[in-house]
Amino acid sequence: MEYSDFLKTKQKAHIESGFDVIENELNINLFPFQRFIVKRALKAGKYAIFADCGLGKTLMQLDWAYQVSKQTNKKVLILAPLVVVEQTKREAIKFNIPIDFIDADNYEQLSNIDSSIYAGVVLDESSILKNFEGETKKLILEKFYKTPYKLACTATPSPNDPMEMGNHSEFLDVMSRNQMLAMYFVHDGGETAKWRLKGHAVKKFYEFIGTWAIMLNKPQDIGFVMEGYALPKLNLIEKQIITPDRDNGQLFNDAIISATNFNAELRATMDLRLQEVVNIINSRPDENFIIWIKHNIEGERLKKLLPESIEVKGSDTNEWKKEKLLGFANNEFRILITKTKIASFGMNFQNCRNQIFASLDFSFEGLYQAMRRSYRFGQKNEVNCYLITTDTMANVKQSINNKQKQFEIMQNEMSKAINENLKGNKMSENDFDITTESNEWYTIKRGDSCQLINDIPDKSIGFSVFSPPFAELYTYSSHVEDMGNSKDYKEFLIQFDFIIKGLHRILMDGRNVAVHCMDLPIQKGKEGYIGLRDFSGMILTAFQNAGFIYHSRVTIWKDPVIEMQRTKAKGLLHKQVKKDSTQVRVGIPDYVMIFRKEGEGKDPVTNTDLPVDLWQKYASPVWMDIDYGNTLQGFRNGREDNDEKHICPLQLGTIERLIHLYSNKGDTIFTPFMGIGSEVYQSVKMGRRGYGIELKESYFDLSKKNCASAIELKNQLSLL
């Protein structure tokens, strides 16, 4: 494969597999913005509709399913939560959509469904995908892997939940969750479930979603001015209860609780909170109420305090849940008691303008989804949401407020970015200027090493030392040429192979390449298990395949305590020894993998200035005395504002030893991943000539200063 062809494979573009439909063939009840969305989803074939509550997702998915069934003359399946299935069937009748070729069933029946008979599948309330783990999620992906038409519909997903986006992307055959995480996200230390967008990749990520999804909070978001799409006023009414003094040895009760003692605090304050619920309901005797609870015991207590109420809980039969949830929507009774995980997805409770959160927790998403059952387009009245808190739970409300502000900002930015270009964009290629600085001591270039290495003459490099991008662990830029922007290790190694083959050509016969690396942690939140990836083994195999000889390996000791403090890795925590020591591991060291090009060197490396005691230190298989703080100063200046991780420059002590061992004065030392210029800087200091290539502009600019300072330092020493 030519390198230019390989770069094209890295550019992500969603392939449309659908069909065009004439607008007058669509359901006459669709509004113009809904027609636009349905046409777009049919054209794509596999698509996601992220539309806020009340924007008509049910009608859009029903007409999408009908059009697919007409096109293929085969059935289409709509999967939805239990009670939503009944609502979907009622909507089909209401809007005169033929359902002879449309089946609607709930997710619990998935294992009994023959997916092969369907030409299309719709996931209604598809955001529940993120709650599906293990066999259930796998079953959805496996059963509909070959289904040609797919539609996922949900309200605006959480911008901070990459798992939800990844599962949607995987379901729609766009990109696997793991590929998406590697491409656009970084892992937050030891918190295995926490991923966040790479700083430079935010816009690219949302543009990527825009190639297979549309998002809107209101029709205006996609260019349609519509009357009637204005939400009524939402009243968030906090009712804080002052708890009696407790015998805790303190002047006041503790106002800060954590996830650890949260449930205990709910039990301790239950009677006070539930009495406030009763007071609120009695103040509005003629209005409907939904009471959201956390514990079953709260439901039992409320039913005694409010005899006319009906509770729907997890242990109820499906028939009871369906009957009572629909019954409340039809005003058959006044007070519904339930939990957010049971009734906060898909239900339309616009008949109810009052909600009470008797057990407020840290989950903003649970609160948001529950409120939207009543507070949605089509609601005619002001909505009252009562938040029952206590003075001991002040930080819970503050946490929700902070999450709400963040959610609103991210939601707006996400919608704007996705819909800014409805055709989507690709990663940029060659959108940078190739810059060169050269003098008697070094040549440094800004550009892509895989291409610029071709400019270096055969057998002109005496030694090469570098630290390659660690595939998905660190990413340095948004360029498609950046090896850190690889969807997986296979793609990384294909690109790295262009470098290795180039190194084999430019290296003098019999000379060496030193590669700094480490084995990489595998996080449970991404791949489902905790372990290590043999990155050093991958590098070894790649160099051997290119004709290099595996020459030596140095282990560089790192302090496991510092690693534990930095990463909070489960395997390094002492408490894990007591809990289950099968999960503990040693700290992850750095390695220097040394390879040799075959052939007899015409210019052997002679180290007459290497005394025995220093040689014995060099010859140790473990370098215990490398100072991790001895790096090129000022490296933080190469970190741009939107970078998620600063570059990790190779320690100068490591570079010094390797150059001393494997090169002569006057040799040219090459690094294809120059970063801030550490290898070139150290080469110049030691009387060699440096040659470096760096893709990222801010790092290249800093390397220019650092390399120039090496010449100044050298000149000062020569004067002395």
Image (spheres, rainbow, N blue to C red):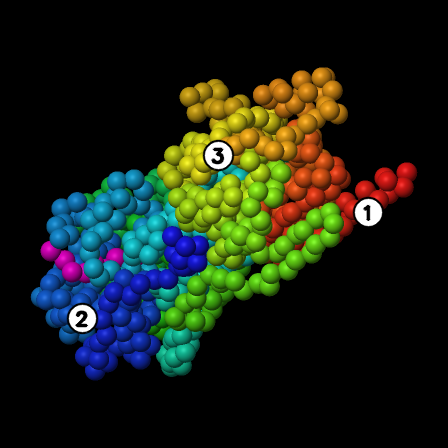
> What is the CA distance from the residue labelled 2 to the residue labelled 1?
73 Å
Could you tell which of marks 2 and 1 lies nearer the N-terminus? Answer: 2
Residue 633 rendering spot, x and y as whole percentages: 73, 43
**Sequence order check, earlier mark of 2 and 3:** 2
Q: Amino acid at mark 1?
A: Glu
Mark 3 or mark 1: name the one nearer the start of the chain. Answer: 3
Q: Which residue is mark 3?
A: 548
Q: Quadrant of the C terminus?
A: top right
Residues at discs 2 and 3 in contact (Cβ within 8 Å):
no
Name the quadrant containing residue 34: bottom left
On the image, the x and y values in percent for residue 296 come to 33, 41
| Residue 19: image location, x then y, percent | 22, 71
Instruction: Tell me how far mark 3 sits from mark 1, CA to CA.
Output: 37 Å
Say what secondary structure mark 3 lies in. Answer: loop
Q: Tell me: 579 left or right of 325.
A: right
Q: Residue at x 60, y 61 (%)?
A: 434
Q: Is residue 256 above or below residue 447?
A: above
Q: Residue at x 52, y 43 (%)?
A: 505
Q: Nearer the viewer, mark 2 or mark 3?
A: 3
Q: Which residue is mark 1?
A: 712
Which amino acid type is shown beneath numbered disc 2?
A: Gln
**Badge 2: few (under 14), some or many (20 or more) residues near its Cα, within 10 Å?**
many
Read off the magenta span. Answer: 117-125
CA gap between label 2 and label 3 equals: 59 Å
The residue to which callout 2 is attached is: 67
Residue 471 is situated, as x and y percent measured from the top left of the image, at 48, 44
